[in-house]
Image: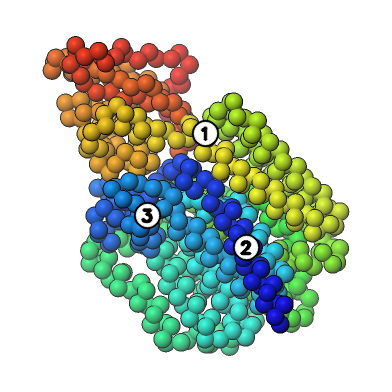
Amino acid sequence: MLGSLNKRRSHIVMLFLLTLAMVLPGLASLPVIDRDEARYAQASVQMAESGDLLNIRFQDEARNKKPAGVYWAQTAMIKTFSQDDTRKIWAQRLPSVLGALLTILALYWGGLQMVGRKAAVIAAALLATSFIFVFEGHIAKTDALLCASTTVIFAGLGRLRNGGGRREVWVIWIALGASIMIKGPIGPMLIALTLGSLWAWERNLKWAQSLLNWGAILVFILMWLPWAVAMYFVTEGAFFAESLGNDLGGKIVSGQESHGAPPGTHSLLIWATLWPASLFLLPGLVYAVKAVRSGSETTVTRAMRFCLSWAVPFWVIIEIMPTKLPHYGLPVFPVLCLMMGAAILTLKHVRGFSVSRFVSGLVFLVSTTLTLGIVLFGQSQYGPTDTMWVSYAICGIAGLAAIIAAFCLWAGKTGFSLGSALFASMVAMIGAYGYILPNIDAFNASERVAEAITKFAPDISPRDIHSPHYTEPSLVYHVGTEINVKGDAPDLSKSQLIILDLMQREKALIYHELEASAATRENCLETSEPIAGYNYSKGRAVELIILREVPCADPRVSSPPEAKEDRPAPE
């Protein structure tokens, strides 16, 4: 008994350190990601600055899309770690780090009761090193926290099915309330789909009757109802009309914001988003199906039925929805990892699933090639050339480990395969987030523009800056809330600084119009050095300059910037 307890403690410490090793590198140096992270981060900054915890705004626009949970969490971090209006993106990313840690520990906690200690620790390690999980753990938005809350619900329900009691009931209801405050109906929808599927499958939900705990239900209601009532009156119902009608409803009936894709997209993307755990995806699914079809009524069989009831209905829904983003499947990934953990433990003792192992390994090698190839392409196209060898070394080592993992799976050496896959991920993820991505300056144009403005005009207020071409939310975050990023015609009589994109063909005309306007005030133009970058939100290069008026006798007066012949036409 004591030995088992010590092993659990060592597993918890190991998983805690592994998760931190995956999500902490690059937390402060990774550029603010356009556009979702930048919008969340900026709205949280405005909430902290205004002290208004109800109205969620991006500049002067109401952001009535998601509940306030993540904004409150980020605001708390801003108040704790920021001073004098300094914006520290690492502080706003801390809630996602905490969400990642909670997810891993909750999966292990639930897995202990469902599939045993060894399979649970394997499942948690697979999830902690998976691509989309590590990415979401790095950025300041809702999905890491949502995954934490839904995984706690899953773990609580799984333990409740296997003899859990009052503690699990309270955990489930509190996690469900938190999920509503983070992303609205996703948590309740998962519970409803899972319990409905289990009832249809087993015709027995007596184990779930203990969920009717009125004290826990009252706490659950108090977690979100006061906020919901307040938001209804403060926004005169606009929040719910926009969040449920336009945001959620729009995603269900059409592809929002150019994110539409056909059914099957998530099933194709999962080989990359769940990498490297996807190496064991098909064996895990085959194991789960064989377990539930075996006719036995063991703890593992019941666990696999529960896992399939959680994963399959939700997966069908996100595949049917026209709007698709890679992170939509994240609430299902812990469950898939639990299936894979049980399968790996079985394959270490019994050689089987030969077809699924072969196919899974083959597709894994293809997804590895594409994933690491994209990293190297970004480095070669937009990163510094003098340190390119480091990126090749990182991807080369990770790629070699992935190849070994696939061949070991084919050879039935499941333990070696697992170790190699985890090693490949650690090298690739820590290297990419800690070194490769922070050093690609082309992706960090907004921060470099903000730094250039500080040198160019250190005392200027953001309200006196206009950026009509480059309007990314990250620019608002780095420069300040009051910067004008509307596409209006630039006018130096109204704005002291103007940011132009030289890649726009109309720039020469705009420059001469501004020059002529300045001449009417007996002034000339001073321009900064160009700032080259890549706007990945729009898929095109940018070359930004900063303009301002100065007296014509001022030695800082600049010549008109020269257009480059190879600049592409604007989209």
Amino acid type indicated by mark 3: Phe
Q: Which of 81 and 162 is in front in this view?
A: 81
Asked if residue 355 is positioned above or below residue 370 in the image, the reply reads below
136 w.r.t. 556: above or below: below
Which residue is denoted by mark 3 in the rendering?
Answer: 81
Q: Residue 440 carries which label?
A: 1
Res 60 seen here:
yes
Residue 39 at x, y percent in the picture: 37, 48
Would residue 252 be seen by someone viewing this image from the given angle?
no
Category of crowding for the residue at label 3, using alpha-carbon neighbours closer than 10 angstroms: few (below 14), some (14–19), many (at least 20): some
Residue placed under numbered mark 2 in the picture:
15
The residue under label 2 is which amino acid type? Leu
Q: Which of 162 and 558 is in front in this view?
A: 558
- Earlier-in-chain disc, 3 versus 1: 3
Quadrant of the rendered image containing residue 551: top left
- Secondary structure under the numbered disc 2 in the rendered image: helix
Q: Is residue 214 above or below residue 67?
A: below
